[in-house]
Every structure is written in structure tokens, then in C-alpha cells.
Image (cartoon, grey):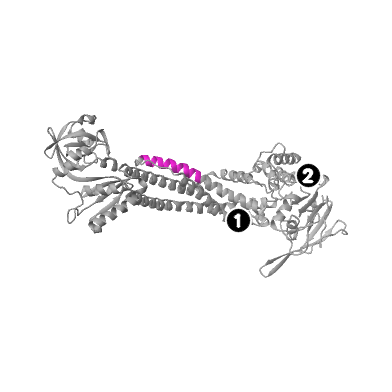
């Protein structure tokens, strides 16, 4: 997979031939210094962007050529995002934030409420349903974000520096939660620059200058070209 | 995502920014309110004027013959014959013998205007006697010395005050000749001096003798019905042209014509004023667009989040579009209420009975909805086109 940006006359090869196959129910961490292309890779995996060349399949479906709306559909159904900065809507309560992906899935209001409540209970915030993000601690906010990522029942959870803005105790809690989600059978992709965080995954992929420099997993099942 | 959900989102965004929303709406409120106020007041004034005209008889056709008697003379008998021939168009004709009268009653004396006419005048110009009777055909035939008087004369000169009815049967002197009061006219202008309530009517035959002039210059025709007035007018013009052979010898005006011209003028004025007021609606729309653009920039990150978790372009577009439509509709409703109340208050102040026109309400409100959509599309489209990656990076 290639992603090439043109800045004036300079060509930036943010992804310079990435070959990667992530199997279902894997817990993968992608680690690399800033500028290594890991954010670009995350955008690709998260279907926020499409590669300049190369192909990307999610569950057998090629998504590298999809339209903006089709990508939105894939993001909605198959991917749950967890961001470093939580990215909750501060005007909405916790439960309303968790309901958002369900709104775009077209789930009816009573079922939506129920699913959102279950997701929040799952992350241990059953008693904070109607708090606004500003009334919650950082760790709690990230747990709301995890609940939001879970609510739409995606197969892939994509976490971008989920512990970056948290103190070490909250960070550990979040990591613990990700491990639990993995054990429940979800595919987790964790993007970080922190080796301590990265090593908690089953498989560690190192990336630098847009190419994979090491992959702790067996390489015989590579599927991306 | 349902439209209902989009409404709920728009609503929560609106109430989280009350002051700003109100200021944004203000343009639309002022626009809608001023359109409604102006149109309601103008319509009220128009109705009042129309009513006044109609009280003078809508089937009335007035003929002025400034040069009657110089050259050919047209007599009452000729016109009566003409009316009889055109029974389908005319109900009758009344001569207007105008003059001035010096009225004396006991020690009181008063100068007023005098009209000599016949019974047709009462119906043609909608001038009935409230008490007693109007001039009748026998009076005209016999040149009776009978008079129908306005309420001012009855109240002040005959000194009857509130009981004008008591003036019936009294004898008054008009230009030195005794007349018997047989009728009191319906009050038209609160019985003031010098108004339509300050005059006397006598049989035209008597009047011709009194002012020593057999030539009548003005005639009032009563059309058979409202719908045939214009036909009757042209028929009458044809007859007069044939008689005098000169278009300048006569002037024919129908009440309906005057009314139509006036209505047209007032209608045009209303349109112009409403149009000017409508400009503020457009200005209000620009205000909405401005704020929506600011709001899109402010909420770039929110848009990024929504898109990342699966909002399609359409979802974002609808969300912002509905927000601007809700703002303008709300402004429209508040403007409607303000306009109706304002027109009422202002109408009371300047003594005009306001007339509300539902079609104008619909139009003003519809226009405000249109403004919301029109000026909302650009910001909403801008929001929907944001790239989620860049939007998420936005601080």
C-alpha cells in the first residue's frame, strides 16, 4: 500500500509499500516514531482515507476504491475508534455520545438507548450515564469513548494512542479493558509510540519512514500487496 | 438517521446558544413582523376607505354637464326616458339641483347647502331618512314645500339635541319660504357643522323655482346592479355624446371606477411597502448564513468526530440545514406573532381597524422558511464536505 502526498514539488511518501495482514481476533500494536507514517496507516485502516495505490481489504471486501459515503458506512459498521484526545462531544451526555454511531446506523431510539446503556455498563460507567464529558475524569472520558467504539458492535477496534492523555493508572485500566475486549473476540489495532504500551499486544509491528521494519508475527500470511 | 433525530440535534444546538440564536433570528423576526404589520394596516385602511365609498352607493354613476343649457339643453324628462329605455341597466335617475340655503327657525338662522332632488337619490347615493320619510314622487309633482334635513340642522338649529325625531313636522324658513320638515337623514358624520349632516333636501321641482333655474347640471344615476355598472356607464356616455356631439360637454364617473382605481393604487402601495419590508427578510437570511458559517468553523472537530464514527455527507448536510431552517422558522413564527400584535397596537393608536390576510401570513412565513433553506445550503454543504482527518486535527 502506498500513500503519497504532494506538497508543492516535493513528494512525501507517507506509506511506501506497506504489506500487512491482520487476522481476525488479533491484538496488534503498530509502533513507530512520529513522522513514521503510523498515523497515515491508521487513517487507512480506519477507512478515513484511501491509499494512492495498492489495495486494502476488510473482511474480504476491497475498500480502497470506495466512495466517501461507502467508507462512512464501513467506519460506522465495522470500526470502532478510540482517540488519544477522547473526541467526545462536550454538549452531549455520556449516553448520548455512545448513541451517536447507533444514530447513524439507523437504530430506533429505545433500542439505541438500551445498547448505549449496556456499552457504558460494560466499561463500568453505568452510574455516569447522564454526565457530560466535562464532568468526568480523563480515564472516565476514555471509557465513554471505548463504550462509543463498542456500541455499534464493530469487528475492529482501532485505538490511536488511547493512553496518551491519561495518567498511568487510568492508562492501565484502559489497556486492561482493551485486553478484555480482545479476549471477547474482537480485533484490536493499537497505534502508539510507547514501547511499554505496544508490548502488551500479541503482535508488534514496527514502522519507520513508511515501511514495516519488523513484525513479530509469522509473515507467511501476508495478504496486502 | 431520521429527520426527527436531525430536528432534535438542531434544537439542542439552538438552545445551547440562546443569545446568539435570538440575534440571528432577529433579522427574520423584524422582516416577517414588518411585512405583516404593514400589510395588515394597509389592508385595514383600504377596507375602511372602501366601506366609506360603498356607503355612498356602489351602483352610483354621476353625470356632470358643465355646459348644459349653452347650446342644447338636456332636461330631466329626457334622461327619465333614457332610463326607461335601458331598464336592464338603470334603476333610476335623480337630478341634483345644488344651491345654498339660509335657514331660519324662530330666532336661529344658519347658512347651509341645499339639494333639490327626487326619491331615487336616496337609494342611488345611500342617503335614507332615519325618521319620517324622504322626498317622494308626489312632492316632486306638486312642488310641495317639504324638506328632509340633516341631523346637524335638527340638533342645533331646531334645538332638538338628542331627540332629532321631534323636528318632524316643524316649519322652517328656507330662503324666506316656509317648508315642513318631513324627514331626518341618517347621521353620517356625527352631526357636525359643515359636514354631510349639515344640509337640506327638497323636491327638485321646488328647488328649481326657489333658485330660479330650470337647468340641471348634475344627475345621479342608479345602476341596476353592481355587475352592469361599467356597461351602463358606456351606454350613458354614448347617449350623451349623441346628444351633445362633444365629449367635453359631459363627465361621467362611476363610483365603482373610482373605487377600483383607489383599490389599485392602495394595493400597489401595499406591495411596495411589503417589498421594502421584505428586504429585511433577505438581510436576516444573510445573518443566518453568516452565523451558520461561524458555527461550521467552530464545530469542525464535532463534524470530524461525527464523520469518523460513520456520519455520511448527507447526515451532516441535513443536520446543519435543519438547524438554519429551524432558526428561520422560529424567527418566522415569532415574527408572525409580533406582527399581528404590533399591527393591532399600532392600529389602535392611529384608529385603523386592521385586517389580517391569511395568505400574507403564509407568504411571509413561507418566505422565511425559504430564506432558511437558501442561506443554509452553503454553510451546510461546506460542513458536509469537510475531510474527517483534517477536521479531527482541528483545534
Q: Where is mark 1, residue-wise?
A: B381
Residue A207 x %, y %: 79, 60
Residue A59 x %, y %: 80, 54
Q: Determine whether label 1 and label 2 are within 8 Å by CB.
A: no
The boundaries of the magenta stretch are B332-348
Q: Is residue B334 magenta?
A: yes
Chain for mark 1? B
Residue B76 x %, y %: 21, 47
Q: Which is in the foreground here, disc 1 or disc 2? A: 1
Residue at 75 percent of width and 56 percent of height: A42
Q: Where is mark 2, residue-wise?
A: A177
Say yes or no: labels 1 and 2 on the same chain: no
Magenta region's main secondary structure?
helix
State the mark number for residue A98. none
Q: Is residue B338 left or right of residue B115?
A: right
Q: What element carries label 1?
A: helix
Q: Residues within 10 Å of mark 1 (few under 14, many from 20)?
A: some
Amino acid at each position: 500500500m502506498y500513500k503519497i502526498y504532494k506538497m508543492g514539488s516535493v513528494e512525501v511518501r507517507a506509506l511506501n509499500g506497506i504489506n500487512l495482514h491482520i487476522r481476525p481476533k488479533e491484538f496488534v500494536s503498530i509502533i513507530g516514531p512520529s513522522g513514521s507514517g503510523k498515523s497515515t496507516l491508521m487513517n487507512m485502516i480506519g477507512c478515513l482515507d484511501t491509499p494512492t495505490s495498492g489495495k486494502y481489504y476488510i473482511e474480504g471486501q476491497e475498500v480502497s476504491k470506495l466512495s466517501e459515503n461507502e467508507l462512512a458506512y464501513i467506519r460506522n459498521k465495522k470500526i470502532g475508534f478510540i482517540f488519544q484526545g477522547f473526541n467526545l462531544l462536550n454538549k452531549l451526555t455520556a449516553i448520548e455520545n455512545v448513541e451517536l454511531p447507533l444514530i447513524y446506523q439507523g437504530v430506533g431510539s429505545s433500542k439505541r438507548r438500551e445498547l448505549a446503556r449496556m456499552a457504558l455498563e460494560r466499561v463500568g460507567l453505568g452510574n455516569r450515564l447522564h454526565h457530560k464529558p466535562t464532568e468526568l475524569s480523563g480515564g472516565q472520558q476514555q471509557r465513554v469513548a471505548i463504550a462509543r467504539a463498542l456500541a455499534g458492535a464493530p469487528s475492529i477496534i482501532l485505538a490511536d494512542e488511547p493512553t496518551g492523555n491519561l495518567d498511568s493508572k487510568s492508562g492501565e485500566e484502559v489497556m486492561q479493558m482493551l485486553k478484555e475486549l480482545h479476549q471477547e473476540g474482537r480485533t484490536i489495532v493499537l497505534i502508539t509510540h510507547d514501547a511499554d504500551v505496544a508490548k502488551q499486544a500479541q503482535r508488534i509491528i514496527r514502522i519507520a519512514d513508511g515501511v514495516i521494519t519488523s513484525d513479530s508475527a509469522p509473515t507467511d500470511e501476508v495478504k496486502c500487496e | 438517521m431520521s429527520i426527527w433525530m436531525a430536528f432534535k440535534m438542531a434544537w439542542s444546538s439552538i438552545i445551547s446558544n440562546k443569545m446568539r440564536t435570538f440575534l440571528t433570528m432577529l433579522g427574520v423576526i423584524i422582516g416577517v413582523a414588518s411585512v405583516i404589520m404593514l400589510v395588515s394596516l394597509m389592508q385595514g385602511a383600504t377596507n375602511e376607505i372602501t366601506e366609506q365609498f360603498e356607503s355612498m352607493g356602489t351602483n352610483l354613476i354621476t353625470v356632470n354637464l358643465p355646459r348644459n343649457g349653452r347650446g342644447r339643453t338636456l332636461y330631466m324628462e329626457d334622461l327619465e326616458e333614457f332610463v326607461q329605455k335601458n331598464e336592464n341597466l338603470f334603476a333610476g335617475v335623480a337630478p341634483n339641483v345644488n344651491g345654498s340655503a339660509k335657514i331660519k327657525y324662530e330666532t336661529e338662522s344658519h347658512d347651509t347647502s341645499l339639494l333639490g332632488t327626487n326619491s331615487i337619490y336616496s337609494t342611488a347615493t345611500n342617503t335614507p331618512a332615519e325618521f319620517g320619510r324622504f322626498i317622494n314622487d308626489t312632492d316632486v309633482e306638486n312642488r310641495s314645500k317639504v324638506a328632509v334635513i340633516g341631523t346637524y340642522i335638527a340638533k342645533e338649529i331646531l334645538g332638538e339635541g338628542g331627540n332629532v325625531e321631534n323636528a318632524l313636522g316643524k316649519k322652517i324658513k328656507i330662503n324666506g319660504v316656509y317648508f315642513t320638515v318631513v324627514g331626518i337623514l341618517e347621521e353620517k358624520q356625527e352631526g357636525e357643522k359643515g359636514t354631510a349632516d349639515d344640509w337640506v333636501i327638497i323636491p327638485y321641482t321646488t328647488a328649481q323655482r326657489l333658485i330660479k333655474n330650470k337647468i340641471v347640471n348634475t344627475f345621479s344615476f342608479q345602476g341596476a346592479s353592481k355587475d352592469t355598472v361599467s356597461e351602463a356607464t358606456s351606454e350613458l356616455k354614448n347617449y350623451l355624446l349623441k346628444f351633445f356631439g362633444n365629449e367635453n360637454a359631459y363627465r361621467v364617473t362611476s363610483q365603482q371606477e373610482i373605487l377600483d382605481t383607489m383599490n389599485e393604487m392602495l394595493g400597489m402601495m401595499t406591495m411596495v411597502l411589503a417589498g421594502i419590508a421584505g428586504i429585511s427578510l433577505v438581510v436576516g437570511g444573510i445573518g443566518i448564513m453568516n452565523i451558520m458559517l461561524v458555527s461550521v468553523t467552530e464545530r469542525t472537530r464535532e463534524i470530524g468526530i461525527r464523520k469518523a464514527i460513520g456520519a455520511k455527507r448527507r447526515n451532516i448536510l441535513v443536520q446543519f440545514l435543519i438547524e438554519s431552517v429551524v432558526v428561520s422558522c422560529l424567527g418566522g413564527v415569532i415574527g408572525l406573532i409580533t406582527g399581528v400584535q404590533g399591527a393591532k397596537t399600532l392600529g389602535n393608536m392611529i384608529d385603523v381597524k386592521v385586517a389580517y390576510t391569511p395568505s400574507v401570513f403564509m407568504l411571509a412565513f413561507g418566505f422565511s422558511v425559504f430564506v432558511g433553506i437558501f442561506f443554509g445550503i452553503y454553510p451546510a454543504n461546506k460542513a458536509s464536505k469537510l475531510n474527517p482527518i483534517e477536521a479531527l486535527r482541528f483545534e
